[in-house]
């Protein structure tokens, strides 16, 4: 038997079914119109953002990284709860423009920005987090050609990383950002060119559950930002400190102690150097805001035995929930939190493997999980599906197509 991850808070049993916000999974299915589907909770997202603001110093602003979940109704909802939005492509910019979101609330990071993306961002007033000197040259040339003053920041590749990070985005050779020692010269070039100088973006990693690691990284980020500003002989209008706040996915994971992070950050803010005293300070979060507020629901279409093991075959799989299948950067496959959603209040009685409908042995949603007995027609729920589910899975694989999505 392999343990499953912890089910997030906010979910309950209602008339025997999985529910959140008083809505049962069968009602969610009716709204979605079919299985498989993703359901996201407005109330859980709102509560997470409220808790975040209560724990962090009042001065800290919050950006939502829309790559975590770009479902249009969710974007529209969350845009009213956060201070800004971070994008990583021209396609994501178009999503925000379709919703009428002011480009001046948006920042754009990511290596390999195409000229057309740079032009669209500059025209919309988006802050470009420059990833290289060459990207700066292209942005300046495009801005001159279209007669716009670009809003430019520099993304820094720091000489440290976020310890315990699930995905390291800084330290050593990286495709992301400008190596720290080259940043001051680029800052001076941007300012001397008459651009609207928008500060620094320092992102070190993601999915850290250790408060100590995040506290250390934030201290290092503030110190590095001050050093770079001093060397460039300039003050910072804005510092995006990145995020890295993780959520528990697997057995044994403990939630991040957000209060400790906020307390340590408050102490740092009390002694900021002059270069940072007037800067807008942001954290950039995606997974932490929406990850635990979503659930992926798929229906059992077959129950079979093979060499003494029971398989529950569903109509979903890795084409919608790549991360839960263990194929999104996981070295050792472990079980996400899962449940038999239509029998949510029943006690576990059997060990089962939950697999998807794809013709590949990689399509696994749970291995040797101890769950209530389930039959064909029952619904399976995979939790922690609000981030990097629909937005980061190969929905076109084998012609299966995307899952439905609903915001509850």
Image (spheres, rainbow, N blue to C red):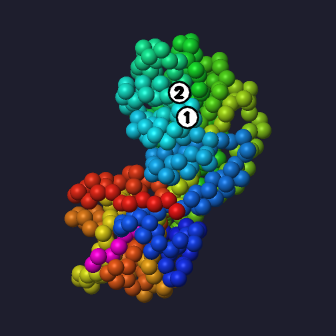
Question: Are the two marked residues, 2 and 1, in contact with CB atoms closer than 8 angstroms?
Answer: yes
> Could you tell me which residue is drawn at 58 percent across and 64 percent down?
254
- Pick the residue in front: 296 or 33: 33
Which residue corresponds to mark 2?
125
**Mark on residue 226?**
none
What's drawn in magenta, residue-wise?
A: 297-302
Whole-percent x, y for residue 270 in the image = 78, 38
> In the image, 365: left or right of 337?
left
Pair 2/1: label in front: 1
In the rendered image, which residue does mark 1 sit on? 102
Pick the front one: 289 or 325: 289
Give the residue at x 48% y 14%.
Answer: 147
Q: Is residue 5 magenta?
A: no
Indicate whether 80 appears above or below 13. Answer: above
Q: Earlier in the sequence, mark 2 or mark 1?
A: 1
The spot of residue 87 in percent (x, y) is 48, 39
Identify the image quadrant of the N terminus: bottom left
Q: Quadrant of residue 395?
A: bottom left
* x and y percentages locating residue 165 in the rendered image: 51, 50
Please name the residue shown 38% across and 66% down the image. Answer: 33
As displayed, is residue 263 above or below residue 93?
below
Cα distance in 3D space between marks 2 and 1: 8 Å
Asked if one can make out residue 220 in the rendered structure from this viewpoint, the answer is: no
Element type where label 2 sits in the image? loop
Res. 376 visible in picture = yes
User: Which secondary structure dominates the residues rendered in magenta?
Assistant: strand
């Amino acid at each position: 038997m392999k343990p499953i991850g912890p089910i997030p808070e906010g979910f309950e049993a209602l008339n025997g079914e999985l529910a959140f916000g008083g809505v049962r999974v069968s009602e969610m299915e009716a709204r979605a119109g079919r299985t498989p589907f993703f359901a996201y909770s407005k109330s859980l997202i709102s509560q997470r953002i409220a808790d975040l603001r209560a724990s962090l110093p009042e001065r800290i602003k919050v950006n939502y990284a829309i790559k975590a979940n770009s479902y249009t109704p969710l974007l529209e909802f969350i845009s009213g709860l956060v201070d800004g939005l971070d994008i990583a492509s021209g396609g994501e910019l178009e999503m925000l423009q379709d919703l009428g979101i002011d480009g001046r609330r948006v920042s754009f990071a990511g290596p390999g920005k195409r000229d057309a993306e740079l032009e669209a961002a500059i025209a919309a007033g988006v802050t470009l987090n420059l990833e290289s000197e060459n990207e700066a040259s292209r942005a300046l040339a495009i801005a001159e050609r279209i007669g716009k003053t670009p809003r430019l920041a520099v993304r820094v590749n720091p000489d440290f990383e976020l310890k315990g990070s699930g995905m390291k985005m800084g330290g050593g050779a990286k495709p992301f950002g400008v190596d720290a020692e080259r940043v001051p010269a680029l800052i001076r070039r941007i300012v001397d060119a008459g651009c609207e100088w928008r500060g620094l973006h320092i992102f070190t990693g993601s999915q850290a559950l250790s408060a100590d690691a995040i506290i250390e990284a934030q201290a290092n980020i503030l110190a590095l930002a001050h050093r770079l500003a001093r060397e460039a002989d300039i003050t910072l209008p804005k510092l995006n400190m990145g995020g890295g706040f993780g959520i528990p996915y697997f057995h044994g994971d403990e939630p991040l102690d957000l209060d400790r992070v906020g307390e340590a950050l408050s102490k740092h803010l009390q002694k900021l150097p002059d270069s940072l005293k007037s800067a807008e300070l942001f954290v950039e979060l995606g997974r932490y805001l929406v990850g635990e507020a979503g659930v992926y629901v798929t229906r059992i279409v077959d129950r079979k035995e093979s060499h003494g093991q029971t398989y529950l075959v569903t109509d979903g799989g890795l084409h919608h929930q790549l991360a839960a299948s263990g194929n999104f950067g996981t070295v050792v496959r472990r079980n996400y939190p899962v449940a038999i959603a239509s029998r949510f209040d029943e006690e576990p009685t059997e060990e089962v493997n939950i697999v998807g409908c794809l013709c590949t042995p990689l399509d696994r949603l749970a291995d040797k999980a101890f769950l209530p007995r389930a039959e064909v027609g029952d619904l399976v729920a995979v939790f922690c599906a609000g981030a990097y589910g629909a937005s980061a899975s190969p929905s076109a694989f084998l012609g299966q197509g995307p899952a439905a999505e609903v915001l509850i």
